[in-house]
Image: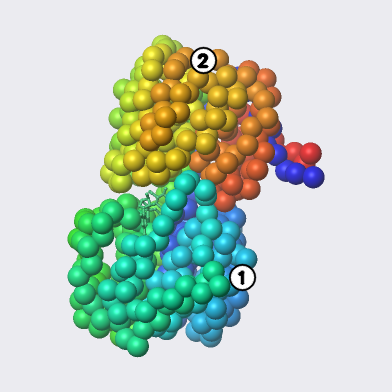
Amino acid sequence: MEEVIKIEGGKLLEGNIKVSGAKNATVALIPACVLATDIVKIVGIPNISDVRSLKEILEYMNVKVTTPSLDSMVIDPREMVNKPLVIDAVSKLRASYYFMGGLLGKYKKVVIRMPGGCNLGPRPIDLHLKGFKALGADIQYQDDNYIISADKLVGTKIYLDIASVGATINIIMAAVYAQGETTIENAAREPEIIDCITLLNEMGADIRGGGTSKITINGVEKLSGCFHEIIPDRIEAGTYLILAAAMAKQVTIENVIPYHLESLISKLIEMGVEIDSQIDKIVVRKSDNCLKKVDIKTMPYPGFATDLQAPLTALLTQAVGNSSVTETIYKERFKHCQQLNKMGANIIITPPSAIVVGPTSLSGTDVWATDLRCGAALVIAALMAKGTTTIHDIYHIDRGYEDIVSKLSDLGANIRREII
Ligand code: EPU
């Protein structure tokens, strides 16, 4: 028995859709709470399976976690025990690697399994480890576990060869209690990093430069508890923008920071989509004219997000002409193209690029969500397709999109979960 999502395509969508808190901020903020010495309350938490895995990891370490409402979490690390993290929950998501920085920073020791996450081709963590080493840590790898420890952590200058989101956040966490000043050069600038720095500063950390490529951390003695609200999810919002561009009579996307989506919005406008961007919402209408082809190249923020490459590729199947899609972050992130081709798309895959030949009409069939954003692309394609699409392996979608089925049903989509 397996749970699938079934979608009957072709229905125009209308209404309002509210974006949840940012997954990729949340999955860093929750592990960051191990650095606190008192209670942290976070609001705006998305109800996704990655959050449930992180909660399980915290509870395994005797951290008290309560959820006063669906979108909030109260984390009490006062009786926490730094146990080796060798449980299955660690392998269910990529972001469990943030416990490396968090536990190393607080206890100067962490034992942890290899993290999991979407299979997007090679995803090394050498830069995270290089940063820990520079701060004074010793790193061993035994029986599939990392053992990272230090007598003391001392601030230093770290240059990242690649502006990695994960390495930037992990090094910040490891450095908040280190002696003296740490600087990270060529730091990543994603909004999720700023959100994580905001949380740590609310706890009492001394971190400057978030959102720029030079971040400075001055070590402190103690971090207390705090209250924090998570930023809206720019990738979820972007997914709904694309979906609305494909099928909306008129859809209003609420709880958005349009500034975080400028690279996508400018591409959609170039394609001929009607977009009205307001302070915290965006109104989208499907164009009456044919969509125009565009070329995209994924880049670190503020460039075009790799996480929106698959969803936009689904829309490009309806644009007139040959659109080129170049992936510079994960050069093998094209599995969704094979699935889209099964539905009738004509995508020529030559990594690190793909050519989307459009427009082609799409038809419903059985497809597999090979990773989270592939799942989002298939939902968009299925809404545009003739007939019924059955999406398998939907646990990938549930890792990152809160209530996608009910949110889209509310817009009038013909979408349901089914056990087959
Ligand atoms: N990289 C290295 N060495 C490292 C770290 C990264 O070579 O030590 C490379 C990666 O292989 C990749 C590039 O650097 O080619 C950028 O990777 P980054 O570290 O920035 O990615 P990440 O932190 O592992 C986060 C998101 C991803 C998102 C990327 C890029 C989380 C939990 N994940 O991953 O989100 O694609 O940043 O923006 O925050 C998703 O949400 O679907 C997703 C995959």
Q: Which mark is residue 87?
A: 1
Q: Residue at x 57, y 30 (%)?
A: 339
Left or right for 242, reference 395: left
Location of residue 163 in the rendering, given as x and y in whole percent from the top left corner: 28, 54
| Label 1 to label 2: alpha-carbon separation | 46 Å
Q: Residue at x 60, y 75 (%)?
A: 60
Task: Give 129 or 16, whichever is nearer the viewer.
Answer: 129
Q: Which mark is residue 208?
A: none
Q: Earlier in the sequence, mark 1 or mark 2?
A: 1
Type of colouring? rainbow
Q: Amino acid at mark 1?
A: Ile
Q: Quadrant of residue 92?
A: bottom right
Q: Where is the C terminus found, in terms of image quarters?
A: top right
Task: Give 292 or 245, whichever is nearer the viewer.
Answer: 292
Q: Where is the N terminus found, in terms of image quarters?
A: top right
Cβ of mark 1 under 8 Å from ligand 1: the answer is no
Q: Amino acid at mark 2?
A: Thr
Task: Give 29 or 81, whichever is nearer the viewer.
Answer: 81
Mark 1 residue element: loop
Location of residue 115 in the rendering, given as x and y in whole percent from the top left corner: 51, 62
Task: Give 402 or 341, whichever is nearer the viewer.
Answer: 341
Crowd rating for badge 1 (residues with CA inside 10 Å; few <14, some 14–19, many 20+)? few
Q: Label 2: which residue? A: 360
The vertical placement of 398 against 140, above or below, is above
Q: Quadrant of residue 290?
A: top left
Mark 2 residue element: loop
The residue most toward the front is: 142
Location of residue 51 in the rendering, given as x and y in whole percent from the top left corner: 55, 60
Q: Residue at x 64, y 43 (%)?
A: 394
